[in-house]
Amino acid sequence: MKVLLTVPMSRPKDDVQPMNDNGLGYLAASCAKAGAEVVLQVWNVNMDMNSFRQKLLAIRPDIVGMKVFTMHFNWAYNTLRVVKETIPDAVTVIGGPHPSTSRPEDIFSEFGSVLDYAVAGDGEASMDSLIQKVKAAKGIPQADALHDVPGLIYRYNSEIRSNKRSFNGDLDSLPGINWALQQPEWFRSAVDRKKNGNAGELYNKILISDSRGCPALCGHCMSFHINGSLPRKRSINKLREEIDELVHKYNVRYLDFTGNAFLSDVGYLEDLCHRLIEFNLPLRWNCTGAAYDRNLRNTKLLELMKKSGCDMIHFGIETGNPRVMKRLCKPLSLEEYAEVVRFTASAGIKPLGYFMFGFPDETPPEMEDTIKYAVSLPFDSITFQTCIPFPGTSSHKALLENHGLKRIDWSTYDFNNPKLLPCKASINQLHSKLFKAKVLRRSRLARGLYRMIYLCK
């Protein structure tokens, strides 16, 4: 049994920076444990379709699994189309954010005959079970044999069925990532930039999956649909073992902890910081606070994080308007976010701020509040984006209701310049705010003038 795990091919140049993929890494380990021969292609690989076709003919996989983000829909569809044209008997299955957040019937309407199965939620147990079914059937299994495959979405005669999702409760029980399949040296990147604008020192920078799940039900976010709302953490020992391998075998010097539950347990985090200090190497790392930013009001914890190599913390605050904040169900108030951002900056750790425009019923003055709020805080960098109505978000629901739509056609949706949004601002008004915000983001002088005019009255 041969399994090809991949990301969509033939993406526009530089659309996605080369990076490792922990989700596919764990999936590859589970497929190997199930007895499959696994080939893994992650975000350092971007073939044109002819090259991908040749790769398929060389491997001749029995199963092709692909991770799909909604914004990669067209590339994902074209990748699956090439698979079915080249190896018609190959079983195609997608997982990741798009199938985990979309309505099951929409998934098969969108992908049609190029897709056999989709998986929602954690995919390790799902792929293990599906591999056994495909082995036994020597191809596409009978639909009535698929009822016990966790999280599987599949056709059953004229209906679409969706099995109960699997969310792994014990992350330590999962087979570890085989880093030989996605070697850290493939993902070297400049972590920071020098004052002259040139790239800083290159590091083997690796994303680390420390936890899964997020209890925050933020309206703009899909995390709780994808990985569940119950936070699950890897043990310190398992995390230390993986870091030890990355540091000593692959010379990794920068760690990006990706879990939304990373800051959930202060004692756990303190233990991890001490373990990182024990390496006695110039290790650097960053994280996100997500639902647990409130724990950063602990100045001693921030000092320890700084000592152990933490140089950045990501803050997805999204809005600076109280009404929009409340509608988004964010876990902290604007005052609390401002406090932890200032504490972080005072500790010598760079706070990075992330904001969006275009939320349901958001008005131009409320967008201006976001600009004022962002500029008032000591962020090292600020990112402003348009809120895309991805499946599973409040924006998606509002857009469908406001415009009387049954679903959004992602094959024609312009993610770079969306024309259809659920806010109460015109597209031109939104672009004006976005342009203004980006000018302020890039110019220290402009931010200073803006503060003098609008914030010092």
Image (cartoon, rainbow, N blue to C red):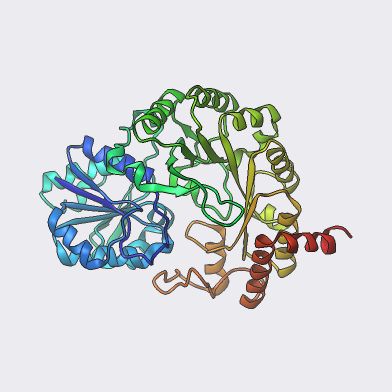
Left or right of 446, for residue 148: left
**Residue 397 on image: x %, y %:** 53, 62
Residue at 13%, 56% (x, y): give it: 58
Q: Nearer the viewer, residue 403 or 235?
A: 235
Foreground residue among 248 and 133: 248
Which of 330 and 149 lies nearest the eye of the viewer? 330
Indicate the position of residue 64 as horizontal and vertical percent values. Answer: 23, 54
Position of residue 45 measured from the top left corner of the image (x, y, whole percent): 31, 56
Q: In what quadrant of the picture does the C terminus appear?
A: bottom right
- State the image quarter where residue 413 is shown: bottom left
Q: Residue furthest front?
A: 196
Please give left or right for residue 409 compared with residue 141 in the image.
Answer: right
Query: Visible in this render: residue 36?
Result: yes
The percent coordinates of residue 274 (x first, y second) are: 54, 23
Which residue is drawn at the image coordinates 34% and 28% (left, top)? 173
Residue furthest toward the right? 457
Number of numbered markers: 0
| Residue sitting nearer the eye, 418 or 390 | 418
**Image position of 162 with respect to 241: above or below:** below
Locate the N terminus and report the quarter of the image it occupies: top left
Picture quarter containing residue 136? top left
